[in-house]
Image (cartoon, grey):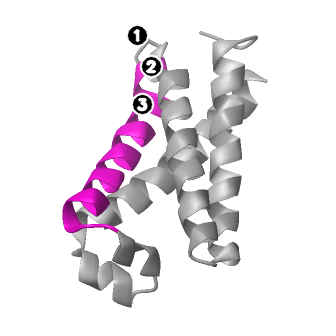
């Protein structure tokens, strides 16, 4: 199970690092024109904050456990990413974007799985 959790955490880290990095690197207007219409509901600083949370969460999924420095941060990061994705699902559903909620739901549930398993039977 440990290998499965590492694989899931690594895939989540790559996804969140890419998504968060894009939100940090691109202006909000460019995100909106590229298809992220949800960004219309948020200010520039809020979009950057979401991106920063995603990048920090991605790093928190891997680095503490990999370097064995405060490995309790790994399930805490997974819990934080679950909460971010729960918020994303709510935003997409509120905007009537059901298809946009599916990826956020899948990522959120995977993050929740990592959090539960790393807090519980497969902790470090």
Q: Secondary structure at mark 1?
A: loop
Q: How many marks?
A: 3
The one nearer the camera, 90 or 56, is 90
Q: Is residue 62 above or below residue 37?
A: above
Relative placement, left or right, of 99 versus 77 is right
Q: Position of residue 72 (x, y in %)?
A: 49, 13
Look at the image and say whether residue 44 sits in the magenta stretch: yes
Distance in Å between CA atoms under marks 3 and 2: 6 Å
Rate crowding at label 1 as few (under 14), some (14 to 19) or many (20 or more) other CA atoms within 10 Å: few
Disc 1: which residue: 70
- Residue 56: x %, y % from top left: 34, 39
Name the residue tied to disc 2: 73
Q: Are marks 2 and 1 in contact (CB under 8 Å)?
A: yes
Q: Main secondary structure of the magenta part?
A: helix
Distance, label 1 to label 3, CA atoms, is 10 Å
Q: Nearer the viewer, residue 88 or 23?
A: 88
Q: Is residue 51 above or below residue 25?
A: above
Task: Name the image quarter holding residue 51.
Answer: bottom left
Left or right of 75? Residue 123 is right
Q: Are marks 3 and 2 in contact (CB under 8 Å)?
A: yes
Where does residue 31 sit, x and y in percent of width and height?
A: 34, 79
Residue 45 seen by the camera? yes
Name the residue at the bottom extreme.
Answer: 33
Tell me the quarter of the image containing the C terminus.
top right
């Amino acid at each position: 199970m440990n290998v499965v959790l590492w694989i899931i955490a690594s895939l989540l880290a790559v996804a969140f690092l890419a998504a968060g990095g894009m939100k940090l690197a691109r202006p909000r207007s460019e995100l909106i024109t590229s298809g992220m219409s949800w960004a219309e509901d948020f200010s520039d600083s809020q979009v950057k904050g979401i991106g920063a949370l995603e990048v920090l969460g991605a790093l928190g999924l891997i680095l503490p456990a990999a370097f064995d420095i405060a490995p309790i941060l790994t399930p805490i990061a997974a819990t934080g990413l679950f909460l971010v994705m729960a918020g994303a699902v709510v935003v997409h559903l509120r905007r009537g974007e059901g298809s946009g909620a599916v990826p956020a739901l899948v990522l959120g549930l995977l993050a929740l799985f990592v959090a539960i398993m790393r807090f519980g039977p497969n902790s470090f």
